[in-house]
Image (tube, grey):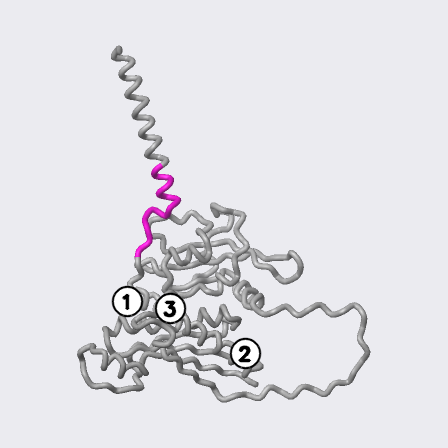
Amino acid sequence: MTKKAQKTTAGRRFQARLAGFHVLASVLLLAGCAPGRPIDPQAQARAMAAKPAEPTPNEFPAIETAKWKEGAFPNLENLRLMSTGMGKDQVRQLLGWPHFSEGLWGAQEWNYIFHLRTGKGAEFITCQYMVRFDDAMLSTGSFWKVPGCADLLRAAAKPKMPEPAAAKPPVVVQPLPSPATPLAPQRISLGTDGLFRFDGGALSDLQPQGRQKVEQLAQEIRRNFRTIQSISITGHTDRLGSTAYNDALSIKRASTVRDLLVSAGIDGALIKTSGAGKSRPVADCSGAKKTPALVACLQPNRRVEVEVRGAS
């Protein structure tokens, strides 16, 4: 083979390798550049407690600069499940990839273009939605550019009343319905050992009977309250483990119960969650070493409290 032919062959091999590198790089970029990693409970607790200031309308990117300009009609149930402390993989599973080119390495802001139905036939409005992340890449808040978009999302959660019949029914005088009677706040305490496996708080940690308990609770709320003003869910733990770990675990337990109530038909906009960690024990047990007897004694402290305010 001549030197010229050898150079030509070597050049072709280099070009082939370069093309292969570009394909590999593209695959890595589409895959998100790196596999997911577990969420640190302490970092999650910090993200959930961050409460950053809401962005101004000028902080949202111009809609014409979007990479995917068509936007999307989002899954409304997924939107209602958005909460602080979520990792990027969890946000992406609920909402999909962001619609703007915001970088893949350490981007602390994802922006979306969402189309929300108004309830009038095929009519919809276009809204911009932002999710912000902290240095640990955990969500610290999600925001709408126009507040009316959030109102529309809440309105969509309520069942649509049927259209009135064309023919007018005969006029019948009915007595006025009695006004709703305010109820004293109802507080329910659920032992987390019956809901979750010991030391667990995620959806995957739920015991089969635990899901059943929360679904029964949702039925009782709908049966006993004609109107609901608010629902407060507070998670608690025993004193075993660090304060930071127990704070994060208690928040996770409260958030999981909230998500189950929403999936059972309770309006998520009425629910607030918090975690008290090990700060409010109801049982006092002696001993510092984690023994089966101490774990059993501390069981009443591992609980989720649900307070419902409304009228019958």
Q: Disc number at residue 69?
A: none
The reply to whether dot 2 and dot 3 touch (C-beta < 8 Å) is: no
Taking depth in this image into account, of 46 and 66 the one nearest to the observer is 46
> Which amino acid type is marked by label 1?
Gln
Q: Residue at 61% of width from left, 69% of height from top?
A: 159
Give the residue number, with chain letter if any, for mark 1.
Answer: 42
Q: Nearer the viewer, mark 1 or mark 2?
A: 2
Residue 136: image location, x then y, percent:
30, 59
Within-10-Å neighbours for mark 2: few <14, some 14–19, many 20+ = some
> Which amino acid type is marked by label 3?
Lys
Magenta segment boundaries in residue numbering: 24-37
Q: Nearer the viewer, mark 2 or mark 3?
A: 2
Q: Residue at 52% of width from left, 58% of height from top?
A: 75
Taking depth in this image into account, of 203 and 166 the one nearest to the observer is 203
Give the residue number, with chain letter if any, for mark 2.
Answer: 222
Q: Is residue 112 above or below residue 265?
A: above
> Which amino acid type is marked by label 2?
Arg
- C-alpha gap between disc 2 and disc 3: 31 Å
- Horizontally, residue 210 falls left or right of residue 72, namely left
Within-10-Å neighbours for mark 3: few <14, some 14–19, many 20+ = few
Taking depth in this image into account, of 40 and 116 the one nearest to the observer is 40
- C-alpha gap between disc 1 and disc 2: 35 Å
Give the residue number, with chain letter if any, for mark 3.
Answer: 51
Q: Nearer the viewer, mark 3 or mark 1?
A: 1
